[in-house]
Image (cartoon, rainbow, N blue to C red):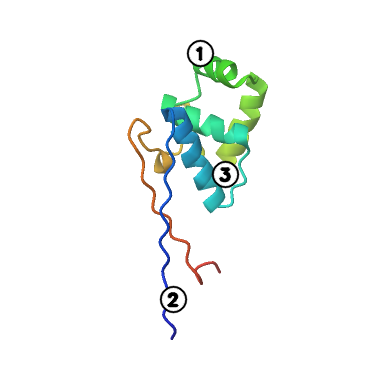
Amino acid sequence: MEEKKIIVQRLKKDVNDKFTLAEKYYSILSAVNSLHLTRREIQLVAFTAIHGNITFYNVREEFCQKYKTSSPTINNIISKLKKIGIFVKVNGKVMVNPIIVVDFNNNLKLEISLEHGKDK
């Protein structure tokens, strides 16, 4: 059996704030997992992960003002993200699935393995 060569490539991206870091992180998760999330969906996931939930009016209003969008748009995105498991409801609060939440106040180093023969 032929041994596959492993290629290591290191990438570095400096970001300005935790929102940008979170958006980059969820963009990578979307790409690697073929989720095809839109930019607005990624923004909502990132914003929600940082704020803890997107349930309360004041948090939704802050998102709408920051990203110049509307409450009905948020509701549509929440519905989609709940269906695919990115958002979950815990104790009546809509939040990002804890499996994919990290602390965006710190630097983040990701290791991604893309392997042959694992997709069946």
Q: Is residue 58 left or right of residue 80?
A: left
How far separated are the C-alphas under marks 2 and 3?
34 Å
Mark 2 highlights which residue? 4
**Label placed on residue 98:** none
Q: Nearer the viewer, residue 15 or 120?
A: 15
- Three-letter amino acid code at disc 2? Lys
**Nearer-N-terminus badge (3/1):** 1
x then y, percent, for residue 103 = 35, 34
| Disc sitting over residue 58 in the figure | 1
Q: CA distance from mark 3 to mark 1?
A: 25 Å
SS category of the residue bearing label 1: helix
Whichever of callouts 1 and 2 sits on the residue coming sooner in the sequence is: 2
Asked if residue 104 lies left or right of residue 54, the reply is left
Q: At which x and y percent is residue 70?
A: 65, 19
Amino acid type of the residue tagged 1 in the rendering: Asn
| Callout 2 touching callout 3 (CB < 8 Å) | no
